[in-house]
Image (spheres, rainbow, N blue to C red):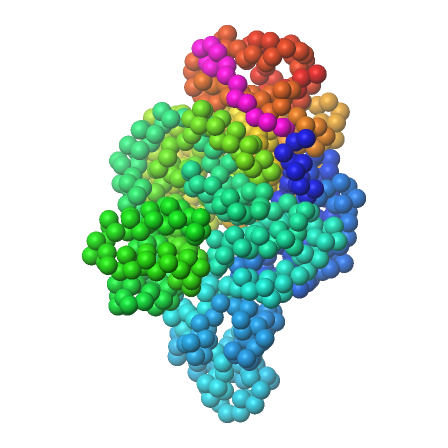
């Protein structure tokens, strides 16, 4: 019995589809036969409940009581899930329990009711609103003076494309007089960060938090999805952003109680060494921890010193702790001001200013996204101690905060500061620091720790064995809708560490010719160009503009520097004119080792412990960047044609087509589905010989061995495998990728990896 069989809903693998208007339930249903033939265990869908009109991602849910009409509605939803069930596929649905979209008020019946009836609305308690402020502040106007632009149209107040309800018996008079009688107050959007009266998702005022800790709210938010689970249409649930919930552990327990047989994974970002709280009855995370480990073990440690030196010569910061602290403080001081004030007001017997400072410094000091008291007491204690060291001037306030939180771990102060610490970490680290600390872009990934240069082989095996022992049904991933770059872009970027000296010389020369006038963005731009080439000027400039705004150094989303942004937009064209031929020649040297690294990390993921997810389209090479670049349409006709050729025995070369990767994905997923008993257990294997460091091998059951190539540039420079060998054990073996037969015992790695740089060996 394999660990993946513990719960009925656990799939052998998943395949993520990003649904959107134009690619909804019907289009997904057409892919079911292909996904079955690919070997997929479960269809994994982005959020499918009703969302903001036109939404391309679905995380902005507006009505949890119905399947999204823009995706085809209930009938097409049911047809898709029935087709999946008939094909033997599970269905995993992404759910969003933390917040709802209020961008279009009339699209959200709960929010419309609150705006109409105020605190008397039956949904007033569904949102996390501070009603002590009086009227609900809505920062949606260009500025406060735009109240004069309001119009009354029927039973609504109208501001350009925005409509807001008019409470009964309040519609007489001028639009401004009508506005003054409502339960809400429309104000300039810039006031939102400092004066907002409701909890939001990060700094997005159009996403209002809901209170799923209330049993009624939980029921109302989950009733429809849980109906699908009960009726057998949905076999698994992916929980978005649990760190924003008041009680993530309580939520997980309630969800498990209502969906006892479902496979449940949570989008919990774990830092190195951090584990899920033991009390959460879920299968695991959505896999960013595995991503960090798989990419890390394929990173050349010799590249750290020269690439750090390059960053220093270019003027890019290399003190990660300092960059991160500065970025987080910017978040508490400028972006989440309203949240800090609301939390500080709960700290008893401390003056407002030291209370705010203590709250902000504690959240800045968190080593992980949040603590989960009382289980996370060590995390909390470490944050307090770090804050005391940094800010001894507010030590009394910090001690008072510590005392009150420890005394009342379920109190409002403890709850809110834990909810908000994850926002500070995510906005300060993932969304800001990762665009400022650009020493090596492949490490600036969700769940990553860019100051840690990779994972050594022994540690990698230990982490994989621990995953198999503790959470064999957790999800693993290499690419998601939220990753900063796709797995293949990341793989080629990893190769830069193997040619670090050459990279340094080239980037310095290119920067002198046509570099960007901001060091961090400049270094990121060259790495991105090398990792994602060939890439259109439009895609590259769109990415760099997003990166520049996220870094908040020279320009921001809300206060753009037009001159600087123009230079960023024009950069790709300048590069092609000045050094385009040189860049292309350099990329040609990276391509083959990049392909090898891509295949290696894919096999490590697909054959390793956990339930592997394949992000849409990444069964072929996919050189995408951060969203929305990674949500481009996928050509499935090409992928269907490849499966037909594989069925005829075709073994493609490792080349620009990516067909070799598709073969690897197909053969490994099919083996997981058809012979799950092979993927039970984990044992490291060691090669011996002159190139042993380049062979990474592991066994699952006694009858399955995966072998991949590490650091392919170094292997080539060393002259190849030589007499490096691996002991497979007795018996006869077959490579599941090629069908080739292999004798047991000590076998030359050159023979095992003669056709491809990876092998998946099954004992006959």
**Quadrant assignment, res 361:** bottom left
Q: Nearer the viewer, residue 212 or 183?
A: 212
| Label tally | 0
On whether residue 629 falls in the magenta region, the answer is no
Q: Quadrant of the C terminus?
A: top right
Residue at x 34%, y 34% (from the top left corner):
507
Is residue 649 rendered to the left or right of residue 726? right
Q: Position of residue 610 (x, y in %)?
A: 58, 35
Residue 683 part of the magenta-drawn span:
yes
Q: Can residue 408 be seen by looking at this rendering? A: yes
Q: How far from the left and from the top, in percent, is residue 111?
A: 56, 72
Q: Which residues fall within the magenta stretch?
A: 679-692
**Quadrant where the N terminus is found in the figure:** top right
The residue at 24%/59% (across/down) is: 396
Q: Nearer the viewer, residue 236 or 442?
A: 236
**x, y percent for residue 325:** 30, 49
Task: Identify whether 236 is placed above or below 490.
Answer: below
* Predominant secondary structure, magenta span: loop
Q: Can residue 568 be seen by looking at this rendering?
A: no
The residue that appears at 54% across and 13% down in the rendered structure is: 726
Residue 380, x across and y down, in percent: 37, 50
Q: Quadrant of residue 447?
A: top left
Tell which of 483 and 604 is nearer to you.
604
Give the farthest residue toward the front.
407
Residue at 55% x, 80% y: name it: 120
- Which residue sits furthest right? 86
């Amino acid at each position: 019995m394999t660990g993946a069989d513990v719960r009925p809903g656990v799939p052998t693998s998943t395949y993520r589809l990003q649904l959107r208007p134009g690619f909804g339930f019907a289009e997904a249903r057409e892919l079911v036969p292909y996904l079955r033939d690919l070997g997929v265990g479960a269809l994994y869908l982005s959020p499918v409940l009703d969302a903001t009109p036109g939404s391309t991602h679905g995380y902005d849910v507006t009505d949890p009581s119905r399947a999204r009409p823009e995706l085809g509605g209930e009938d097409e939803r049911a047809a898709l899930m029935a087709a999946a069930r008939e094909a033997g596929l599970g269905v995993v649905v992404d759910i969003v329990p933390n917040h709802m979209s209020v961008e279009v008020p009339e699209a959200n019946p709960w929010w419309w009711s609150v705006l109409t009836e105020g605190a008397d609305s039956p949904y007033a308690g569904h949102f996390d609103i501070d009603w002590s402020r009086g009227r609900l502040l809505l920062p949606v106007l260009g500025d406060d003076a735009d109240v004069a632009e309001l119009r009354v149209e029927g039973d609504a107040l109208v501001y350009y494309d925005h409509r807001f309800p008019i409470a009964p018996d309040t519609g007489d008079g001028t639009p401004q007089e009508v506005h003054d009688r409502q339960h809400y107050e429309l104000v300039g959007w810039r006031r939102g960060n400092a004066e907002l009266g409701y909890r939001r998702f990060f700094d997005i005022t159009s996403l209002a938090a809901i209170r799923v800790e209330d049993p009624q709210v939980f029921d109302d938010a989950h009733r429809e999805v849980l109906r699908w689970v009960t009726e057998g249409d949905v076999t698994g649930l992916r929980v978005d952003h649990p760190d924003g919930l008041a009680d993530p552990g309580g939520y997980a327990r309630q969800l498990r109680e209502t969906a006892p047989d479902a496979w449940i994974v949570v989008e919990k970002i774990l830092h190195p060494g951090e584990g899920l709280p033991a009390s959460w009855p879920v299968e695991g995370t959505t896999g960013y921890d595995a991503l960090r480990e798989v990419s890390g073990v394929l990173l050349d440690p010799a590249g750290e010193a020269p690439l750090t030196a390059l960053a220093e010569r270019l003027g890019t910061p290399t003190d990660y702790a300092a960059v991160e602290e500065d970025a987080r403080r910017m978040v508490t001081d400028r972006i989440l001001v309203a949240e800090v004030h609301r939390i500080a007001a709960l700290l008893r017997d401390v003056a407002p200013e030291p209370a705010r400072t203590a709250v902000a410094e504690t959240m800045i000091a968190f080593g992980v996204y949040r603590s989960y008291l009382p289980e996370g007491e060590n995390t909390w204690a470490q944050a307090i101690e770090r804050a005391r060291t940094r800010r001894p001037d507010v030590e009394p306030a910090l001690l008072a905060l510590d005392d009150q939180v420890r005394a009342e771990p379920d109190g409002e102060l403890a709850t809110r500061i834990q909810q908000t610490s994850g926002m500070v970490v995510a906005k300060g680290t993932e969304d800001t620091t990762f665009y400022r600390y650009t020493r090596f872009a492949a490490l600036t990934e969700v769940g990553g720790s860019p100051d840690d240069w990779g994972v050594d082989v022994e540690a990698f095996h230990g982490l994989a064995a621990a995953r198999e022992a503790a959470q064999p049904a957790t999800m693993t991933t290499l690419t998601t809708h939220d990753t900063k770059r796709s797995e293949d872009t990341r793989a080629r970027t990893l190769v830069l560490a193997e040619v670090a000296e050459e990279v340094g010389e080239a980037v310095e020369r290119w920067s002198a010719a046509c570099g960007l006038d901001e060091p961090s963005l400049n270094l990121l731009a060259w790495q991105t160009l090398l990792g994602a080439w060939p890439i259109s000027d439009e895609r590259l400039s769109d990415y760099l503009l997003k990166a520049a705004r996220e870094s908040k150094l020279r320009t921001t989303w809300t206060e753009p520097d037009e001159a600087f942004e123009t230079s960023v937009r024009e950069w790709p064209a300048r590069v092609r004119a000045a050094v385009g031929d040189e860049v292309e020649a350099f990329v040609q040297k990276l391509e083959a080792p990049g392909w090898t690294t891509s295949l290696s990390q894919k096999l490590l993921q697909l054959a390793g412990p956990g339930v592997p997810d394949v992000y849409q389209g990444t069964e072929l090479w996919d050189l995408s960047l951060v969203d929305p670049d990674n949500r481009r349409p996928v050509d499935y006709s090409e992928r269907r044609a490849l499966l037909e050729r594989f069925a005829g025995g075709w073994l493609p070369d490792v080349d620009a087509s990516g067909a070799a990767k598709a073969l690897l994905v197909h053969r490994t997923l099919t083996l997981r589905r058809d012979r799950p008993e092979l993927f039970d257990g984990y044992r490291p294997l060691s090669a011996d010989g002159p190139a042993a460091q380049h062979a990474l091998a592991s066994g699952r059951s006694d009858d399955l061995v995966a072998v991949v190539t590490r650091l392919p540039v170094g292997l080539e420079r060393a002259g190849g495998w030589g007499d490096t060998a691996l002991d497979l054990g007795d018996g006869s073996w077959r490579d599941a990728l090629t069908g080739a037969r292999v004798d047991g015992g000590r076998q030359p790695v050159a023979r095992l990896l003669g056709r491809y740089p990876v092998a998946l060996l099954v004992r006959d």
